[in-house]
Amino acid sequence: MKILVCISKTPDTTAKIAFTDNNTKFVQEGIQWIINPYDEWYALVRAIELKEKDPSTVIHLVNVGGVDTEPIIRKALALGGDEAIRVNADSQDSFYVAAQIAEIAKQGGYDLLFTGKETIDYNGSSIGGMVAELLDQPYVSLATKFELNGTTATIEREIEGGEETCEVNLPVVVSCQKGMAEQRIPNMKGIMGARSKPMKIVEPVAVDVLTSITSFELPPAKSGVKLVDPENVGELVRLLHEEAKVF
Amino acid sequence: MSVLIFIDAAEGHVKKSSFEALTYGAQLAKQLNTSAEAVLLGTVADDIAALGKYGVTKIHQVANETLNHVDAQVYAKAIADVATASGATIIILSHNLTGKAVAPRLSARLKAGLVAGAVGLPDTSNARPDDPVGRGFVVKKGVFSSKAFAYISVSTPIKILSISPNSFQTIAGDGIAEVVTANITVDAPKVKVTATNKVTGDVPLSEAELVVSGGRGLKGPENWGMIEELAKLLGASTACSRPVADAHWRPHHEHVGQTGGTIAPNLYIAIGISGAIQHLAGVNRSKVIVVINKDPEAPFFKAADYGIVGDVFDVVPKMIQEVKKLKGIA
């Protein structure tokens, strides 16, 4: 069993978001970079659990990013995973990243490809579906549970208005979310071992860029909260009804 | 050149998010001086010709029962085939769970630039007259988990936009759409669905216009009666914060926040929720936010429009009484 886990670098969930250069550049000063939580907590940890069950499993990590993403790749290797592949390119748009990952996947012949359900920076939920299409493989999005039985996967996933259980023969691309696994903290052995795990650096393939960001914008600041006396709850209901007109 | 809107249906009914997508697509078609058409995969009980009231003139239906279940691979091919046959250059979907599964595949299949989670109509004012949608097609979407917006330029001949639910007002007129059968081949799905578990009854949280949400301040699941009562009176859906879902006080699907669902209702009432940045990421596109919390320092008050600093066990029952009064319920 060979699993490819996609790892993206994102700002920490508590990061203060600001822009510079006429709102065209994200301010990186003071930003703590982390592994995208969905990639780490759910996709990677579930892959590690599968390897714990079947030690013959091989886990590769793939990241599309510059040399500055190596610390988070090492952290992912410290959690688990046998080797990492860094495609040496700055992400252009989702399709660019997906096409690089698809290329790695084609060469590696993986049985299973895991992504997080979305990245917490661009929130596109796009990589998994795009990679699946480029590989002509089935795609199970928003998975909450994943079990393997030989070469058949049984997956629970979230769909519009509920959940479903499905079965699919490998290979398959799965996007992972809460429920798949529980967050882990790397231990000392993992951290030490990660230093000697192979990290392969490959150059990107040529891919057309389909979209580009022209500028950013912060949401308008709230004008301030209107506080109502707890002894006068009727006033709140009146304001919601007459001023905000929400019911 | 035309705009093609994907109509998402579940359990035999067209979803509310599709009315928004239809309205959006029709407005965009008007802006670009072209026609708006739609595609429906599978069969529904609803009168689909009546969807013409949202401004679409033609609906391509693929009435194949295989399609009554969403499979990303099968759907992407079917929508792509209808788009190609009808000459569509812009494809609109809802950025709901179906859209998140299907739109990226469609994008890769057609090599069409995708804006996932658009929150407004494209700015086409910089388009050149000889190439009306080839350039200068810029769409706003939420990024950094609703902490910011980005303007995305789409440079491909075919463009795909998925619309963030509840971000676009539905406009209904009185048109009737022509329903035509689309003759395309439908693949057999590779993913076999063995069980479905639909959340019955209420409006799905992502589509709810009013939401009443509870946090740790409620102290335990036994205290949710007043949350449910208030929600029921208002016709609202119920939601909760992460610690509440993690403690299994409430079902997982009610969890809103960075790691749960993202919602943008007209009204979000947060009861006993402090408002950690991760929670705000899931709800801060709500149009009106009301915070009820006994801690005046709770960060949620900074993001709120209205607030009451007070004990939730005192304030919420009073609020229920006041809403009953307003609605004329004794």
Image (cartoon, rainbow, N blue to C red):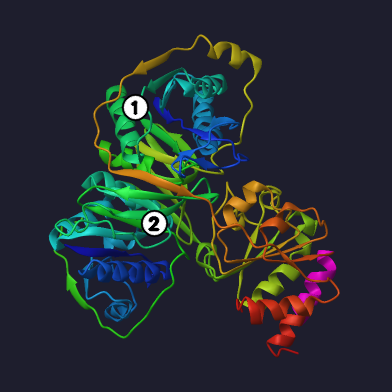
Q: Secondary structure at mark 1?
A: loop
| x then y, percent, for residue B129 | 17, 60
Residue range highlighted in magenta: B311-321
Amino acid marked by disc 1: Tyr
Q: Is B13 left or right of B187, judged from the image as shown?
A: right
Residue B189 in sight: no
Q: Which residue is mark 1?
A: A110
Whole-Å distance between the Cαs marked 1 and 2?
Answer: 26 Å
Q: Which residue position holds label 2? A: B98
Q: How many marks?
A: 2
Q: Residue placed at 28% from the left, 66% from the top? A: B42
Q: Position of residue B179 (x, y in %)?
A: 20, 76
Secondary element under disc 2, as helix, strand or loop, is helix
Q: Amino acid at mark 2?
A: Thr
Which quadrant would residue A220 be assigned to in this image? bottom right
Residue A7 visible, this orientation: yes
* Residue at screen point 66% across, 50% down: B242
Query: In the figure, is residue B172 to the left or right of B132?
Result: right
| Residue B39 sits in quarter | bottom left
- The residue lying at 37 percent from left, 80 percent from top is B172
Q: Position of residue A191 (x, y in %)?
A: 60, 16
Q: Is residue A244 above or below residue A125?
A: below
> Camera-side residue: A219 or B257?
A219
Vertical position of residue A38 compared to residue B141: above or below? above
Name which residue lies at 64% across and 51% down.
B279
